[in-house]
Each structure stands twice: as C-alpha cells, then as structure tokens.
Amino acid sequence: MAERSLLNQLTGALRCLPGVGPKSAQRIAFHLLERDREGGLRLAHVMADAMTRIGRCRRCRTLTEHEVCAICANAQRDASLLCVVEQPSQVVAIEQAADYRGLYFVLGGRLSPLDGIGPDELGLGQLEDRLEEGIGELILAVSPTVEGTVTGQFIADRALSHGVRVTRIAQGVPLGGELESVDGGTLALAFAGRRDF
C-alpha cells in the first residue's frame, strides 16, 4: 500500500505543472517509472538544484542563479534602453525573437489591488531607482489587458516625471493572421498604430 501511496504522491506533485491534469500527470509518472528512471532521477536532481539556487537578479528581477543576471552584467548592452515586462519568460521570448540590445525590468505581474498586488509587490520602487540612472527610453512590453494597461500607465507616469521617454511595443494583427479572425480591439489598435508602407 505504501508503494501505491508514493505513486499517488508523484502523480499529485506533477499536477503542479501548468497544463498537467490528473491523466497527464499519471501518464508522465508511469512513463518515468516504466521507461525512463534515469531521466526521472536527472529531472529530480536538476529540479531540486534549481529550486534552491535560482533567485531574482538584484538589478532587473529576472530569474538567475547569480546575484546579477548575464544580461545586466553584459557591458555591451545599451544601458539607456529599459524594457519593462511582466514575467521572466517574456525576457526569453524577446531575446529569442527580437534584435533588442537594451536592458530589462521584470515586474512579476500586474497591478491588481483586488488580488493584493500593488506597487511594492511589483518592485516599482526599485524601477523608479533605475529611472534615475540615465535611462533614455523606457519600453513598455506589458499585456494589453485592463490590468496591464493600468500598470503601464502607472509606470509611464512615473517615467515621464523623471523626464524619461516612454514607448510601448506595437500591437495589432499577428504576422500571417487573417483580418476576419482578429478581434475588434486588436484591429482598432492595429489601425491606430499604422505606419508608412
């Protein structure tokens, strides 16, 4: 009975992963136990190591195992550009897809007073300190949700009070998208942000 209990614990633990429901967790558990115990042990070791050693960069708040992340430590980056994102995964997405050579600041969420997320939880005091370091342009790369828009406006107001130029990443029709499948709000933003061809 104890063996079954441990299997249930493994299945339950796997359910903490996003998109992994009870059936998927059970499939993963059985796969690791029946076909890839070595991979499961490696996963457990790396996961335990990552959970204890990865923290936040003291400059930009992204995830790193060092006090300062590799991007912030890179003297070749343009320190006059600061891109504000909501999550560390967005830093990775921008680094992989864009030719951006500036620095980042990771909020860790959006302003949401009902959920108890205010300026302190997002490190906005730390962001304000960064604005005093000679930032020439602050690029808002926050979600175009209600909370994201409010968060962006709050940050823009603070940046403008420091004399920092504020821009927002373009929004609109995705590359390869069909106009009839794009929602009205996105289409309105695409028209408002149009530029010369």
Image: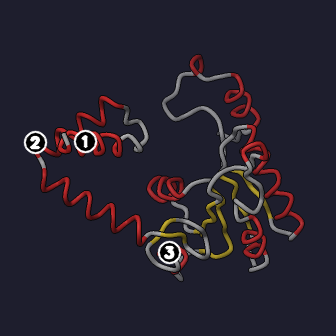
Instruction: Kindly identify which residue carries mark 1.
Output: 5
Considering depth in this image, is 193 or 118 the residue closer to the camera?
Answer: 118
Q: Is residue 25 left or right of residue 90?
A: left
The residue under the point 48% across, 30% down is: 176
Image: 152 above or below 122: above
Q: In this view, does 56 lie to the left or right of 19?
A: right
Disc 3 and disc 1 in contact, CB within 8 angstroms: no
Q: Residue 8: where, in percent of width, then height?
A: 28, 39
Tell me the distance, in whole angstroms, between the alpha carbons under discs 2 and 1: 17 Å
Image: 171 above or below 55: above
Q: Can residue 49 be seen in this view?
A: yes
Q: Residue 22: where, in percent of width, then height?
A: 34, 31
Q: How crowded is mark 3: few (under 14 residues within 10 Å), some or many (20 or more)?
A: some
Q: Is residue 56 left or right of residue 172?
A: left
Instruction: Kindly identify which residue carries mark 3.
Output: 69
Instruction: Kindly identify which residue carries mark 2.
Output: 34
Q: In which quarter of the image is the N terminus?
A: top left
Of the two numbered discs 3 and 2 on the same chain, state the one appearing first in sequence.
Answer: 2
Mark 2: amino acid: Glu
Q: How crowded is mark 1: few (under 14 residues within 10 Å), some or many (20 or more)?
A: few
Mark 1: amino acid: Ser
Mark 3: amino acid: Cys
Q: In this view, does 11 lie to the left or right of 55?
A: left
Q: In which quarter of the image is the C terminus?
A: top right
